[in-house]
Image: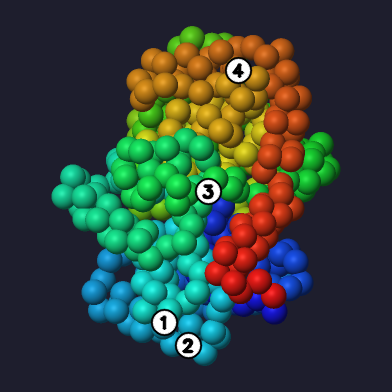
């Protein structure tokens, strides 16, 4: 039996939780996986229901928190070392930044034979100032030296990490895209659409546009809101705009939306907070948007395409590895309101184009982002590393 200790930042709604779940539940039977996560923040949607759905057991290390804290981080490192000593894993595989630093440090101190890390995103631009960003890069380079393989989730991300930010030599990286249970986005779409639109009082003649994600600075909701505002003067379509998610900027974003509504004299924005089963929501939308300044592989865009919903997105992170630009959505270079608004209008005013993109979405993501492909790719990597270390069982 090959023992894997999988460590993730926290169980919040998003790609890392889904992927840690699938890799725990669906690798071949020769693997025994122990899953550890940190504590999630109050404004984030808890996602332990995903693990429960797939009958995945997990443990929480409360001291492993998102924010840097010398006391908490020291305590978390000690707890992770103790878990490693008791479990005796052949492989420690960490996911995302905090878990990646503490988990790899603990694995190195306990002489774990194989250490793997997955970057789901990174914080090397648009998050912090130069000083803090520089410190994070130094810390990542330090633990990269203690890592056998670093996984990037797109070719674009790999290039950023090894060529631009120089986290580790390019030979240490492998590209393994994320994987999801996409079939559920194809099921009962008509009934889901009706139920969702009834719940949020979206009329038949209204075009529903959604943006999905944390209400935080990096997601750049202001660009989306101002682009919606700019679009309203150039279309006769009736719009309903759904802000799906929650976060520390909820108050500010609500105020910005209220200003737009005051200018146009009607209410068009709806705040839904987190929706746990997003497959129930997507069929009710006609467009899904993303306006982020930085991303890894944006899960909302993969899921939207699986549900047959066209997308409009900024060109960040691995977006071009996810969206077939011009065929399943529109990718906007830069962060200018006029450019984003033009992309929105191109789809708002063109029903035929939306319909064609809707048909293309499933074919684009079906095999590329399925969780069975993810598990197969990861199994191949683990077997290669085990053989290289003389540990193949």
Q: Which residue is mark 3?
A: 174
Q: Which mark is residue 85?
A: 2
Tell me the element at label 1: loop
Task: Report, in whole angstroms, how far the alpha carbon at label 4 lies from the one at label 1.
Answer: 50 Å
Front tag of 4 and 3: 3
| Dot label at residue 326 | 4
Q: Earlier in the sequence, mark 4 or mark 3?
A: 3
Residue 191, position as x, y percentages in the image: 82, 41
Residue 258 visible in the snapshot: no
Q: For the residues marked 4 and 3, what is the alpha-carbon distance in whole angstroms?
A: 28 Å
Quick check: 253 above or below 139? Answer: above
Query: Mark 2 or mark 1: which comes first in sequence?
Result: 2
Residue occupying the far left of the picture: 131
The residues tagged by marks 2 and 4 sit, at their Cα atoms, a distance apart of: 52 Å
CB within 8 Å, label 2 to label 4: no
- Label 4 or label 1, whichever comes before in sequence order: 1
């Amino acid at each position: 039996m090959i023992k894997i200790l999988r460590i993730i930042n926290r169980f919040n709604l998003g790609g890392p939780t889904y992927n840690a779940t699938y890799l725990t539940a669906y690798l071949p039977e020769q693997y025994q996986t122990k899953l550890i996560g940190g504590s999630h923040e109050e404004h984030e949607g808890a996602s332990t229901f995903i693990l429960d759905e797939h009958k995945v057991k997990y443990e929480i290390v409360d001291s492993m928190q998102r924010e840097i804290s010398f006391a908490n981080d020291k305590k978390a490192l000690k707890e992770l070392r103790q878990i490693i000593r008791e479990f005796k894993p052949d492989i420690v595989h960490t996911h995302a930044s905090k878990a990646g630093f503490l988990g790899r440090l603990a694995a190195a101190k306990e002489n774990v034979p194989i250490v793997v890390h997955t970057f789901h995103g990174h914080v090397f631009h648009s998050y912090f100032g130069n000083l803090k960003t520089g410190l994070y890069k130094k810390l990542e380079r330090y633990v990269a030296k203690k890592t056998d393989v670093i996984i990037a989730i797109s070719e674009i991300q790999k290039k950023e990490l090894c060529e631009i930010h120089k986290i580790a030599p390019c030979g240490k990286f492998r590209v393994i895209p994320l994987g999801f249970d996409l079939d559920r986005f194809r099921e009962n779409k008509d009934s889901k659409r009706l139920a969702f639109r009834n719940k949020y009082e979206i009329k038949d003649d209204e075009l529903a546009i959604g943006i999905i994600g944390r209400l935080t600075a990096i997601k750049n909701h202001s660009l989306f809101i101002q682009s919606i505002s700019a679009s309203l003067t150039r279309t006769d379509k009736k719009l309903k705009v759904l802000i799906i998610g929650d976060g520390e900027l909820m108050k500010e974003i609500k105020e910005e939306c209220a200003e737009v509504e005051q200018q146009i004299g009607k209410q068009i924005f709806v705040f839904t907070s987190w929706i746990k089963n997003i497959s129930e929501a997507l069929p009710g939308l006609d467009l899904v948007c993303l306006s982020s300044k930085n991303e890894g592989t944006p899960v909302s865009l993969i899921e939207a395409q699986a549900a047959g919903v066209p997308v409009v997105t900024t060109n960040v992170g691995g977006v071009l590895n996810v969206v077939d630009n011009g065929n399943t959505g529109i990718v906007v270079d830069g962060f200018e309101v006029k450019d984003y608004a033009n992309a929105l209008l191109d789809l708002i005013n063109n029903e035929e184009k939306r319909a064609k993109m809707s048909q293309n979405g499933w074919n684009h993501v079906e095999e590329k982002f399925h969780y069975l492909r993810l598990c197969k790719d990861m199994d191949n990597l683990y077997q290669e590393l085990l053989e290289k270390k003389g540990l193949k069982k």
